[in-house]
Image (cartoon, rainbow, N blue to C red):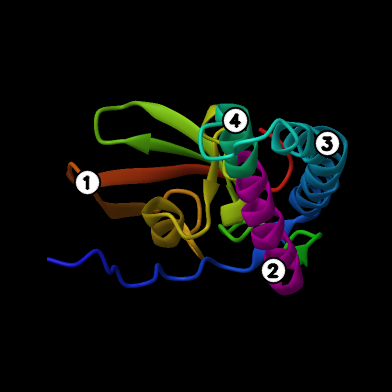
Amino acid sequence: MGRWRPPPESSSPYITADGAMALKAELAELWRLRRTDVVPALSAAAAEGDRSENAEYIYRKKQLAGIDRKIHYISKRLEVIKIVDRAPARQDRVFFGAFIRVEDEHGGRQQYRIVGADETDAARGYISIDSPLARALLGQDAGASVTVELPAGPAVFELIEVRYTSL
């Protein structure tokens, strides 16, 4: 059995203005970190001699490769993102950027914001527009009931509230 895996589906290019600023800030921070911390440390470790058994050199080289990968990813992502910086004309339905409140079939209530894949944050309740729940709710009015296929099986959610300002 080989290790080949099909490439993942590309995520939606949409992002909020705050998310785009955060990505740009992260890119700037990575460049600063790379220049001021990792490169000089790597050079110093390389100057110590035998690189094959130099743990500091190996660690710094892997660290630099990780930073370069992240810089490459963010740079490419910034080329394709589409910033959504205003609310839709119909603010009574769920679209990108909506703050929503849902109730599950057991009466538990959660609130989420539908954002781009690059700005998801479970602690803040920010879910990707590509998530099963967001896909099921897109275009729905408050009061709508949707069935979402979750890893644990199908679940029913009722959309209680839709807003485009923080709940």
Give the residue drawn at x 58%, y 34%. 59
Neighbours of disc 1 within 10 Å: few (<14), some (14-19), many (20+) = few
Q: Residue 98, can we see it?
A: no
Looking at the rendered image, the disc whose residue lies closer to the viewer, 2 or 3, is 3
Q: Earlier in the sequence, mark 4 or mark 3?
A: 3
Q: Quadrant of residue 146?
A: bottom left
Farthest left residue? Answer: 1
Magenta residue check for 60: no
Q: Which residue is mark 4?
A: 124
- Disc 3 marks a residue whose amino acid type is Pro
Neighbours of disc 4 within 10 Å: few (<14), some (14-19), many (20+) = few
- Disc 4 marks a residue whose amino acid type is Arg
Question: Which quarter of the rendering shows the N terminus?
Answer: bottom left
Looking at the rendered image, the disc whose residue lies closer to the viewer, 2 or 1, is 2
Q: CA distance from mark 4 to mark 1?
A: 22 Å
Q: Earlier in the sequence, mark 4 or mark 1?
A: 4
> Is 82 or 39 nearer to us in this picture?
39
> Percent from the top left, x then y, of residue 9?
42, 70
In the image, which residues are magenta?
A: 63-82
> Percent from the top left, x then y, of residue 43?
78, 39
Neighbours of disc 3 within 10 Å: few (<14), some (14-19), many (20+) = few
Q: Which residue is mark 2?
A: 76
Q: CA distance from mark 3 to mark 1?
A: 46 Å
Looking at the rendered image, the disc whose residue lies closer to the viewer, 4 or 3, is 3
- Disc 1 marks a residue whose amino acid type is Pro
Using the image, determine if residue 59 lies above or below residue 128: above
Q: CA distance from mark 2 to mark 4?
A: 26 Å
Q: Quadrant of residue 120?
A: top right
Q: Which residue is mark 3?
A: 40
Q: Which residue is mark 1?
A: 151
